Image (spheres, helix red, strand yellow):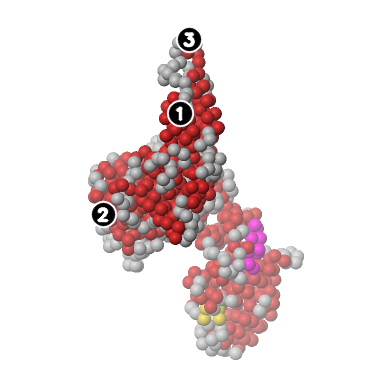
Amino acid sequence: MADSADVTPAESSQPPVKEEQGGGEGGEGSERDAGGGLTDAQREVLERCLHALRQAQNDSHTLASLLLITRLCPASQLDKPTLRRIFEAIGLNLPARLLVTAVRGSDNSGLPPQELLSLGTALLAALSTDPDMACHPQLLTTIPFLLGILANGPVNQQKQENQEQNQDGERGQSPDCKVQSTESSNAESDPTNVVKSAGEEAKGDDGSEANGVSTTSQETSPCSKMDEAMAADCYQVLTAVCALPRGADQLLSRGAIPALCQAVEQNQTFSHERGLALLGCLLSGKTKDKVWSKHPAELLTLLVTLSKDFCQATDQTKLDMCAQLVQFLPPVGVAVESEELKGVVARVWGVLRPMLQAKLTPRQIGPILVLSACLLDLHGWELVGPPKFCCLLVNRACVEVRMGLEEPPGNELSPELQHTLTGCYRIMEAAIEQACCLGVAQATAPPQSSIPSISLQQTRQVLGVLEEAFSALMYHLQQVDPSRYGDPFVFATFRSLCSWLAEETSCLKQEVTGLLPFLISYSRSHLQGESPKHGLSDWMAEMSDREERGAWTGKEALRYLLPALCHLSAEEGPRKVLLTLDTPALLVDFLSQCWTSPKGKSGVASARDPSMETACSALLNFTVTEPERVRKDPCFRKLEALLSEALPVLVHKPRLLVLAANYCTLALMIGRLKSAPSGSVEAGQRRLFSTALRFLRSALDSSASPGPVKVSLSWEESWDEAAELWRLCLQALGGCARAQPWITTLVREEGWLKHTLTMLSQCSALPDKHTQEALEEALCAMADQCPVCKVEIGDMMKNDKGALICMRNLKKSVGVK
């Protein structure tokens, strides 16, 4: 770069301009224009300087014109279009070359490296205030340099670059060749390649080695500390880039995480004030999982440091740090479980316990409860503390919920309060999971995440305060207008209530039944895509609970409500309300939408979806208890069509065996309510029953005869869940044979009857009494409805062999003594 000594005489080459000019004759009218606050004389000088910038032959001329602009036209008086013209005239080549020259330590620059860095970063900071400039590829190539300066300090960064150049020299390349080629060029040269070669040479996929930024600890001398202005300029550029639509990805791909973590670890200038804030932005939203997966070691080290700072901070600082710590906790399920992370969680709980026991204002307790919720998400109740404190935590969360939600209708909740209440919901949900289990069966082993050593009395107390809090949730949801269905806070409230309803529907039954119209309307609105989803997608991306993170599909609301619907559809009062709300049609629509995913995947790729099974259970409740509704409601015909399409596919997907058993049960339960067809049987119906018979036949294995019958290998893993469904299927099969006699012919044609009789005659016993009773009921129905079946069964029973001899009712049906 040319010597900058030419800057001084260049200053005086322009006519002087009085700072306060603008008064006098005509001054009032010409002092300001629509574009900014410059006088006529200042605008004239500005135009000359802009011309000089565009025509500059070397960097000295450029700097002289730029210095004159800053002296005579303060930035505060320039409007955006004028600033944009200046930025375009300067361009990004100059600051990039200043950084390259400073970092590589050229002796020909005429200025100390520190001054070159200061000038280069200042120019970049000014340019980055324009979003179009901030996203320019040339500016983005300087990010590794800026990160290196922040991580290593300006002196260490120069040393590191010089070491790399010396290594190049040992390989036969002159360390100064690149710099000289850069310096010999004027403003027309493009520094992009130079910046890339200096800063991105060794960059990996995630940019962690960009600019030679070391992720290991280095000795930091006092001289490596940068001045505040340079640090502020570097952070200004990075923050401006981060604010761009894809800004976070631009920083992450250039090694921002290890560099900023190193800056904080070495306590570089502004690293705690601005570096942590920038890291917090990069660790929020959709990028959090990705960042923790790529840089777990650096982020865990940073978290350990922050947790120690948290422990040593003053009371007020601790309150301020609660929200900061939330940003730096790892996402559930992504971070590798380690003793180090466990130590962090235990350490933070140790600080939070006395804080929660103190007298706090609502504004103070909010961040503490949110942090507590995040810690619970990570490690459950194990590290929280003694049972008494765990109960206090739940109680404080419930009190905040009641205070926040039991407001008169129409009162809007502030975003801050909504954030606090959402954290309280997660504490309540964690309490429900274990309190309900222990309240129902104290003798059973508590869940791993349960409160250690909690007594039955404490459990009842917890359930009592939870009931009061959930009453407040129901009161709040009763006031929600359909126009607010897309509000993330409404979804958070809905989700939390559903978590309670999944475990407890006997309490507040009247209130729950009264709320059903809202719950169904809300779920239907989202499933059918009537509610806006943008805010909900963003909210799910921010959730610390891994179950929540992901794309919004519209099915989420109903998924949470399904366990409650399964309970409520079994009770007469709530079921009648659900029928008036056309709930069966909603469930069928849900199954139809969910089926689009597994039907196109191979058996290996298919993932189990428990919510589909729960929806089947709720529909089964309606089918068993409301036969007339099943016969008349068109949605059940739609369900039959879905079952006819899906069951033949499901039986070939081993991982979805429980769902197949649910579909088979539903199909046969509906079939028993239908009358015999007047003409020929529909092809879809025949295919459905044929598939069901083959599926049921595959459950038991008689190859070990003459020993007892065993559950087949394909069913063995799922037998605990599928056994009851299999028995229901056999009972329903008997009902189908009575309602539609043509099925008995199919039973013989498909070989189910012969297979079953052979198995029973060859084996000594069935797996259990309930299995025997179900098979006997189905065989009795066949004998009663089909003379041919009766003869075949009778002939087999006359041999007086195997498990058949134990079926006394069947003997009566076929007339065998």
Position above or below: 482 against 715: above
Q: How far is mark 1 from mark 2, CA to CA?
A: 64 Å
Describe residue 438's horizontal placement relative to residue 87 as left or right.
left
- N-terminal label among 2 and 3: 3
Q: What residue appears at the point 53 percent right and 35 percent down from the top-left corner?
A: 57
Q: What number is the disc on residue 350?
A: 2
Q: Do the residues bearing badges 3 and 1 touch, measured as CB atoms within 8 Å? A: no
Residue that numbered label 3 is attached to: 25
Report the quarter where the C terminus lies: bottom right
Q: Quadrant of residue 274?
A: top left
Mark sitting on residue 10: 1
Mark whose residue sits in front, 2 or 3: 3
- Nearest the viewer among 351 and 705 is 351
Residue nearest the observer in this picture, 17 or 262: 17
Q: Amino acid at mark 2?
A: Gly
Which element carries disc 3, helix, strand or loop? loop
Q: Are dots 2 and 3 in contact, CB under 8 Å?
A: no
Q: Measured from the top left, where is residue 232 in percent x and y?
A: 38, 40
Judge whether 326 appears above or below 3 on screen.
Answer: below
Measuring from the top left, give residue 596's x and y in whole percent.
Answer: 61, 58
The crowd level at tag 1 (other Cα within 10 Å; few <14, some 14-19, many 20+) is some
Q: Residue at x 44, y 60 (%)?
A: 170
Dot 2: element: helix
Q: Which residues are magenta?
A: 637-651
| Residue ID at (63%, 67%) | 649
Report, in whole angstroms, how far the alpha carbon at label 2 lies from the one at label 3. Answer: 73 Å
Characterize the local packing of mark 2: few (<14), some (14-19) or many (20 or more) Cα atoms within 10 angstroms.
some
Dividing the picture into quadrants, the one containing residue 813 is: bottom right
What percent of the width, then of the height, locates residue 720? 48, 72
Determine the CA span between mark 3 and mark 1.
Answer: 31 Å
Secondary structure that dominates the magenta span: helix
Q: Amino acid at mark 3?
A: Glu
